[in-house]
Amino acid sequence: MATTSLDRFRLDGKVALVTGASSGLGVAIAQCLAEAGADLVLGARRTDRLQETKSLVEAIGRRAVTVTTDVSSPEDCTAMVAAGVEEFGSVHVLINNAGVGSAAPATREAPEDFRRVIDINLNGAYWMAQAFGRAATEGGSLVNMSSVLALRPGLIPQAAYSASKAGLLGMTRDLANQWTGRKGIRVNAICPGYFPSEMTDEMDEGAAELIASLTPMGRLGHPYEVGDACVFLASEASSYITGVTLTVGGGIVMP
């Protein structure tokens, strides 16, 4: 047990899995966890981009293994967790970060498009949680990456995305209730606000400025600000926290 406040934020000796680790927030999350001392299991569909994240982790002095992972496949999720156990001996942290965006008027969204978003963002997080819950025999921490759009409407029609992210909050509470006492796995959710990413790059011109003007802090977030929140929830610093939703959005939502 760590004895000082700063020590309790350390992740030395821990193994963390990060899905969607090939770009955006996933890269920042992996980097922050490595800086806190964790070794990493990095999963995403784009294997070439995963190598770049692996190099960042190794430059910090931590170990990393990459696994090509489509979280909508339960078999891929099981394989990613198994790779972590095989490489490092155990797993302790899962950051369910993989996800896709969507934007379509509700009357025109195709069934296959809606199902794809749910299958990756919600079902995929559940398959990863299942695999992690079976393997994390030493207890640990699971963080589901939701969104402020689970708590408030966005500027554009995003029913599928909002539904998938709201579903993650319900799943978080249920898994926390199931696993915290019985397995020693704390389960929490983060609702990021707006951050520079591939999703925000696709916004109309001027959208980022509008969002910043609606945010009390007056700006978009820095990716490391979500990464630092993940370190907090993964570490002993949050040892008495489970089943909660932490909004990291500069005040754009105040639940």
Image (cartoon, helix red, strand yellow):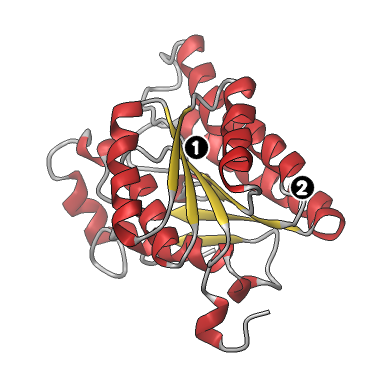
In the rendering, which numbered label is found on residue 162? 1
Query: Mark 1 or 2 closer to N-term?
Result: 1
Q: Please give the name of the residue rendered at 36% of the width and 60% of the height, measured from the top-left corner.
A: 61
Q: Please give the name of the residue rendered at 71% of the width and 36% of the height, measured from the top-left corner.
A: 130
Image location (x, y in percent) of residue 212: 23, 58
In the rendering, which numbered label is found on residue 71? none
Q: Is residue 106 above or below residue 38?
A: above
To which quarter of the image does residue 127 belong?
A: top right
Image location (x, y in percent) of residue 228: 42, 66
Name the foreground residue: 202 vs 154. 202
Q: Quadrant of the N terminus?
A: bottom right
Q: Please give the name of the residue rendered at 39% of the width and 46% of the height, measured from the top-left corner.
A: 26
To which quarter of the image does residue 128 belong?
A: top right
Q: Quadrant of the C terminus?
A: bottom right
* 3D distance between C-alphas at marks 1 and 2: 19 Å
Which structural element holds mark 1?
Answer: helix
Q: Please give the name of the residue rendered at 72% of the width and 48% of the height, measured from the top-left corner.
A: 136
Residue 167 visible in the displayed image = no
To which quarter of the image does residue 193 belong?
A: bottom left
Q: Amino acid at mark 2?
A: Asp
Q: Is residue 121 above or below residue 35?
A: above
Name the foreground residue: 41 vs 216. 41
* Tally of numbered discs: 2
Pointers 1 and 2 in contact (C-beta within 8 Å): no
In the rendering, which numbered label is found on residue 174? 2
Q: Amino acid at mark 1?
A: Ser
Q: Residues within 10 Å of mark 1 (few under 14, many from 20)?
A: many
Image location (x, y in percent) of residue 33: 44, 60
* Left or right of residue 1, residue 59 in this image: left
Image location (x, y in percent) of residue 67: 47, 31
Which structural element holds mark 2?
Answer: helix
Residue at the far bottom in the pictured view: 4
